């Protein structure tokens, strides 16, 4: 079988690359794929290329079967490449340009995508995490974010929730990490040094492979509500997932998305866990990157 040539455009943002990389890697697990990362065009060069102007970029790259990109900064390059190379275009997240310009739009449900033939709604953002067969029910992970556009912060309230989780099962071992958004006050207050079951690893001490390795082992994962992408990564790994509460600034598409996950039984909010302190693993596999990749292969490349 001839490898499927996929051009994956990047805008340089790690979160966006995580999504497009998750899709292309899922495609590669379904059939042979050659992944190419072309240079992104400037907006002027991309517009000129679409208008029929001269295009000097990408002369030696293999002809693509599929063009993939996430983030506004990739949109014009994607369309210019399709104009010149006649390949199908897949865009992740709701594009800033009209949906009709793309062959497939993978849009999270919380962005209320319209019902169209070229739109596939996803449960959250795609990611590179894979379901794990090595989850340890006695190994726990806590992922702490920080204030955001949708959520405020409460150091004391969050530490109280963490203490409650730690107190329930003395046999559990926990690792806690932070994010770039975590206020310095959260770790400055410290945690009980006598609690040998909790290891704190600040985000500065982690590398790009640290979190995937932790998610491949942790049977239970607690995520602060502001870190929605981490919620979906933990679900994809197959862990039992709890959501630590932080103040909501207002009802938003992000908070409503979390509420929908909780209502469907995918995650357990801390308030619900307090009434019955038990986290349950999802009964079904949660792997949106693979679902989207199968959609593409079965409809376009079978």
Image (cartoon, rainbow, N blue to C red):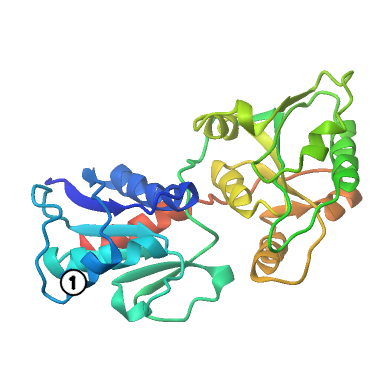
Q: Residue at x 36, y 64 (%)?
A: 91
Question: Residue at (11%, 54%) from the top-left corner?
Answer: 63
The vertical placement of 71 against 274, above or below, is: below
Q: Seen in the image, is 47 located left or right of residue 209?
A: left
Q: Kindly tell me whether residue 8 is visible in this rendering.
A: yes
Question: Nearest the camera: 196 or 274?
Answer: 196
Q: Secondary structure at mark 1?
A: helix
171 and 59: which one is in front?
Answer: 59
Residue 44 position within the rendered picture, expressed as x and y whole percent measured from the top left: 25, 68
Front residue (pair 1, 13): 13
Query: Is residue 254 depicted above or below 8 in this figure?
Result: below
- Drawn side of residue 246 relative to residue 70, left or right: right
Q: Residue at x 45, y 81 (%)?
A: 115
Q: Quadrant of residue 252?
A: bottom right
Residue annotated with mark 1:
48
Give the percent coordinates (x, y) of residue 202. 68, 30
Task: Judge the density around disc 1: few (<14), some (14-19), many (≥20) Cα neighbours within 10 Å.
Answer: some
* Residue 226 occupies quadrant: bottom right
Q: In the image, residue 211 lies at what x, y percent?
A: 57, 34
Is any part of residue 299 visible from this angle? no
Total marks in image: 1
Seen from the viewer's position, the closer of residues 103 and 261 is 103
Residue 117, compared with residue 245, is above or below; it is: below
Check the picture and name the quadrant holding the N terminus: top left
Residue 32, position as x, y percentages in the image = 21, 43
Residue ID at (77%, 38%): 184
Q: For the C terminus, which image quadrant? A: bottom left
Along the horizontal axis of the image, is 256 left or right of 24? right
């Amino acid at each position: 079988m001839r490898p499927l040539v996929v051009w994956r455009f990047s805008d340089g943002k790690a979160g966006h690359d995580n999504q497009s990389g998750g899709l292309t890697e899922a495609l590669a697990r379904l059939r042979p794929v050659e992944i190419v990362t072309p240079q992104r065009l400037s907006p002027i060069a991309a517009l000129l290329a679409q208008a029929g102007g001269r295009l000097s970029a990408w002369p030696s790259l293999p002809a693509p079967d599929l063009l993939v990109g996430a983030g506004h900064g990739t949109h014009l390059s994607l369309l210019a490449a399709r104009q010149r190379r006649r390949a199908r275009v897949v865009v992740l997240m709701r594009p800033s340009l009209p949906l009709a310009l793309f062959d497939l739009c993978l849009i999270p449900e919380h962005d209320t995508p319209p019902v169209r033939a070229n739109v596939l709604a996803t449960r959250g953002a795609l990611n590179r995490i894979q379901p794990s067969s090595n989850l340890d029910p006695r190994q726990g992970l806590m992922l702490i974010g920080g204030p955001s556009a949708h959520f405020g912060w409460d150091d004391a309230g969050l530490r109280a929730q963490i203490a409650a989780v730690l107190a329930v099962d003395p046999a559990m071992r926990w690792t806690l990490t932070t994010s770039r958004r975590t206020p310095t006050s959260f770790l400055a207050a410290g945690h009980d040094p006598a609690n040998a079951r909790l290891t704190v690893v600040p985000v500065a001490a982690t590398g790009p492979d640290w979190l995937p390795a932790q998610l491949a082992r942790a049977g239970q994962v607690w995520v602060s509500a502001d870190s929605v992408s981490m919620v979906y990564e933990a679900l994809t790994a197959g862990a039992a997932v709890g959501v630590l509460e932080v103040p909501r600034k207002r009802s938003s598409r992000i908070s409503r998305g979390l509420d929908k996950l909780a209502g469907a039984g995918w995650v357990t909010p801390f308030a619900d866990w307090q009434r019955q302190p038990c986290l349950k693993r999802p009964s079904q596999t949660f792997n949106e990157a693979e679902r989207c990749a199968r959609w593409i292969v079965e409809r376009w490349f079978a």
